[in-house]
Amino acid sequence: METNSYWIDTGPIKSFPALPSDLKADVLVIGAGVTGITAAYLLKKSGARVTLIERERVSSIDTGHTTAHLTYVTDDPLETLAKTVGRDHAQATWDAGACAIDEIERIVRDESIDCNFSRVPGFMHASIFGEGSKGDRAELKQEAQFAQELGFDAAFIEGVPHFGVPGARFANQAEFHPRKYLGRLVESIPGDGSDVFEQSAAEEFDSEKRRAKVNGHWISFDRVVMATNNPLVGLASITKATLFQTKLALYSSYALGARIPRGSLSIALFWDTADPYHYLRVNRQGAFDYAIFGGEDHKTGQVTDTEKCYAHLVTKLKKIAPHAEIDHRWSGQVI
């Protein structure tokens, strides 16, 4: 069984050099995951000279270990979000997610990228493993109704496909192969004054001169985009950056990749209401379908026997898809 992520194994991306000398850019983008690559791509399209730097390999850390659900539905229920930040801001958050999916779809079409992009429904549903609450049905119905009120294509259903448990169906979610997508985008960035550098970590910032020290060299810039998963001590003060960092918690999440008989599960995104929750995506691959199933999240460092996390996932996946042939497993971190 492969212990690399499915995306890294099936989506090779060309290598880029390390920063060899000082240079000047209109915009410095730090972090070459989906956020950084997208930002650099769009900035170059707008006419800017962009330098994109990555401390390791392009799309190899967080983006390389994702489970690639393209959804505007947030982890916090929409109604909870509305109570926290207000109805308008909650709606804007989901709208932004929907616009992001639309933008990916547009880029895939305009650049003719073969990355298995497809629109699929998403289902938030009661746990089939007995880990949800007794109020799941009412809460799911309320979530679907509130989403409808804010203009989203959502509906409560008594039986989610295959699982038969109550759920909320959200239309127009999507799935894709993130590294096939990003590989094409990042290859289009170098040239005409723009560059991509790997093995090039930002070591130091000089806010007065607007420059960053990378591999012992200086990159001067007019603007900077921080696109890292973990915050950096950047143009903000060290104190502010440190205070922000102490409010964040890293969680480890685990995933399995498996071949399943064609048509045995619906082509869709699924996530349940357990805490921590489980998530599943299914896509078609010729003669078979491929399922990626994840969960068993915990605060990073709190669990030492990670084999148990994988074992629990295997047991649960076999309950969902008894004939699953597991060929990949991996873990990633989320904040």
Image (tube, helix red, strand yellow):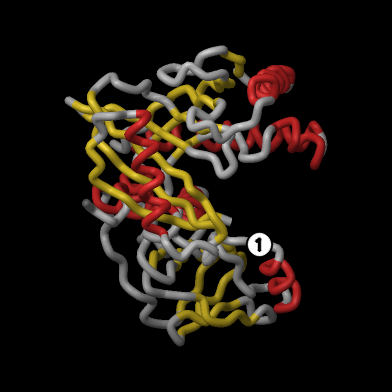
- 294 and 104: which one is in front? 294
Count numbered badges in the picture.
1
Kindly tell me whether residue 199 is visible in this rendering: yes
Residue 78: image x %, image y %? 70, 32
- 63 and 20: which one is in front? 63
* Relative to 222, residue 34 above or below: above
Left or right of 282 in this view: 100: right
* Relative to 285, residue 207 above or below: below
Left or right of 216 in this view: 78: right
- 187 and 243: which one is in front? 243
Q: Quadrant of residue 120?
A: top left
Give the residue number, with chain letter if any, for mark 1.
248
Residue 233: image x %, image y %? 64, 74
User: In percent of the image, x 49 and y 39: which residue is there?
Assistant: 278
* Relative to 220, residue 70 above or below: above
As drawn, the residue found furthest toward the bottom would be 216
Residue 6: image x %, image y %? 29, 47
User: In percent of the image, x 61 and y 65: which residue is there?
Assistant: 223
Residue type at tag 1: Leu
User: In percent of the image, x 40 and y 45: which residue is there?
Assistant: 312
Q: Quadrant of residue 26?
A: bottom right
Residue 263: image x %, image y %? 28, 19
